[in-house]
Image (cartoon, rainbow, N blue to C red):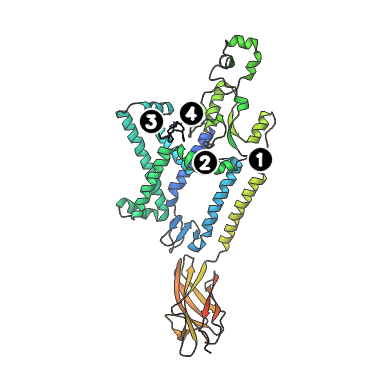
């Protein structure tokens, strides 16, 4: 049977077998920044469902809630109804443009610091490091035969990973129901089946993606690196190995004799005496592989830009630590642009940061992002808190009354988007002589408008009848207007048709 990499049987490999990555612990400004962002992101995710927000006695008091049962989305003081889904679409568009903006300005910063896959993988790596030890200890344990110590460590590690996965799924379901109530029901075993199924699925996916697959998700599964690769240009920040300064490498030897032993293969003293210019050609890189050891995806940044680089900056921290030890300037590996790299290699000053940020591309992205956000805020602040929808009854299409007038039936839906009961007036216009009445009131109370009470944060369905003189067009436009009768006011309008039978010859 052919090896899975050799499906053709002729030795041609379609993919490289996975080499397990054991990232080494490192300290530095970028590592501390990752710590801060990870803690803030996890705190927001786990704490948000438990925050309370007072919306009055008629609405839920959970600050962020996706209420599928009542088809509402609450976010602090904002309430989104089903017919306002364009706000959600706008937020998704803003998120997409925001990623474009971040990529244009600071490269793949989202991938390196704030992506959920990065955050949870980082958490899982820290758990693994706490149980199995740092890189060398993990490699040694991986190669060691199975025994009581290795089995105990594996059970402890994977158990904690599963607990983290369960907590991740458990936090997610609290966004869709009152968190304290659902939490008690979940523990007591009386929660809906979908809650347990959701926790099970998210536990499995978090455990597999964050604990087992890790860098494979970023390199092979996620489409965003491919998109970002097409969006980067010469002015986008990337983590860059400054080869013009680091090469040729001294391969870990003492700085007094790298090239003599590695390049020339002759005794160093003789070589340096005969060719003293070699000393000035020694690069700062000592080929210690510290940058590779700390990389969470296992790449060698010295080989240039790669799709596996998430620009987390850990290799910068590792390299800066080595440079400090050997007395060389920091930032042999650093955030820079292709343009600045060429300028530095030529001995010229880099492009000013503000000039690099405020360029047409980033300004265009920011303008689109801010424009959509401002438009949504304006629409949100000026939207009416009352709405109306009219559906004509088609069976029967019309009824001729005893006085010769024609009656049509309608179902009017009045949306009260306030957290309090409201009285509204429904009026009609567009058909001369038309009057309306509710099914409960009867025709003897027919008028040009009716008054209806609507419960707080609810949609009231009001069956209405409209009659008009029998003489007239077979189909006439009929407008329904709803107007709130409280001091806040507000109105909405919808149109339908009033239909009559064809005139007899």
Task: Report the front residue among 364 and 420.
Answer: 364
N-term mark: 2 or 3: 2
Callout 3 secondary element? helix
In the picture shown, does residue 288 fall above or below 475? above
> CA–CA distance between discs 4 and 3?
16 Å
Q: Which residue is under mark 2?
A: 111
Instruction: Name the residue that disc number 3 marks.
Output: 132
Residue at position x 47%, y 43% from top? 116
Marks 4,3: beta carbons within 8 A: no
Residue at x 52%, y 88% (from the top left corner): 504
Q: What is the crowding at mark 2: few (fewer than 14 residues within 10 Å), some, or many (at least 20)?
A: many
Inter-mark Cα distance, 4 to 2 = 19 Å
Q: Which residue is mark 1?
A: 356
What's the CA distance linking mark 3 and mark 1?
A: 44 Å
Q: Secondary structure at mark 4?
A: helix
- Asked if the residue under mark 3 is in contact with the one under mark 2, i.e. CB atoms within 8 Å, the reply is no
Q: Is residue 372 above or below residue 473?
A: above
* x and y, in percent, of residue 442 in the image: 44, 83
Please indicate whether residue 195 sits to the left or right of residue 66 in the image. left
Q: Which mark is residue 293?
A: 4
Which of the two residues, 181 or 462, is positioned nearer the viewer here? Answer: 462
Give the structural element (helix, strand or loop) at label 2: helix
Is residue 418 something that shows in the picture? Answer: yes
Q: Is residue 81 visible?
A: no
Query: Is the C-beta separation of discs 1 and 4 under 8 Å?
Result: no
Q: Earlier in the sequence, mark 1 or mark 4?
A: 4
């Amino acid at each position: 049977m052919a090896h899975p990499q050799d499906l053709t049987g002729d030795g041609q490999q379609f993919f490289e077998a996975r080499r397990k990555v054991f990232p080494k612990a490192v300290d530095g400004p970028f590592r501390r920044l990752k710590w801060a962002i990870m803690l803030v992101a996890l705190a927001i995710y786990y704490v948000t469902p438990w925050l309370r927000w007072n919306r009055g006695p008629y609405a839920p008091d959970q600050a962020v809630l996706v209420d599928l049962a009542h088809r509402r989305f609450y976010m602090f003081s904002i309430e989104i109804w089903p017919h306002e889904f364009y706000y959600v679409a706008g937020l998704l568009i803003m998120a997409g443009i925001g990623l474009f903006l971040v990529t244009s300005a600071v490269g793949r910063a989202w991938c390196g610091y704030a992506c959920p896959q990065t955050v949870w993988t980082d958490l899982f790596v820290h758990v693994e490091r706490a149980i199995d030890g740092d890189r060398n200890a993990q490699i040694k344990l991986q190669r060691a035969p199975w025994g009581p110590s290795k089995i105990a460590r594996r059970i402890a590690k994977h158990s904690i990973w599963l607990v983290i996965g369960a907590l991740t799924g458990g936090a997610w379901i609290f966004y869709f129901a009152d968190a304290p109530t659902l939490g008690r029901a979940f523990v007591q075993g009386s929660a809906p089946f979908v809650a347990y199924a959701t926790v099970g699925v998210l536990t499995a996916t978090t455990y597999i993606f964050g604990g087992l697959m890790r860098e494979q998700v970023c390199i092979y599964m996620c489409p965003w690196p491919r998109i970002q690769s097409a969006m980067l240009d010469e002015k986008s920040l990337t983590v860059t190995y400054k080869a013009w300064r680091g090469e040729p490498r001294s391969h870990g030897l003492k700085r007094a004799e790298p090239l003599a032993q590695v390049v020339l293969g002759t005794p160093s003293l003789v070589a340096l005496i005969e060719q003293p210019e070699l000393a000035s050609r020694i690069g700062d890189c000592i080929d210690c592989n510290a940058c590779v050891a700390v990389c969470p995806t296992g790449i060698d940044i010295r080989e240039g830009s790669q799709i596996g680089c998430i620009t987390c900056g850990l290799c910068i921290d590792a390299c800066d630590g080595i440079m400090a030890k050997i007395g060389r300037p920091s930032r042999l590996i650093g955030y820079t642009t292709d343009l600045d790299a060429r300028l530095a290699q030529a001995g010229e000053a880099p492009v000013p940061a503000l000039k690099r940020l405020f360029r047409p591309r980033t300004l265009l992205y920011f303008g689109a992002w801010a424009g959509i956000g401002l438009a949504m805020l304006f629409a949100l602040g000026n939207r009416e808190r009352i709405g109306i929808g009219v559906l004509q009854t088609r069976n029967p299409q019309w009824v001729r009354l005893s006085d010769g007038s024609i009656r049509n039936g309608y179902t009017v839906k009045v949306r009260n988007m306030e957290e309090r009961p409201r009285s509204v007036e429904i009026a009609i216009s567009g058909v001369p002589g038309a009057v309306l009445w509710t099914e409960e009131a009867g025709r003897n109370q027919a008028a040009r408008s009716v008054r209806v009470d609507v419960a707080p944060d609810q949609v009231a369905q009001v069956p209405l009848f409209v009659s008009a003189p029998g003489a007239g067009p077979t189909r006439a436009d009929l407008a329904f207007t709803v107007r709130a009768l409280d001091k806040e006011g507000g109105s909405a309008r919808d149109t339908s048709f009033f239909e009559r039978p064809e005139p007899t010859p």
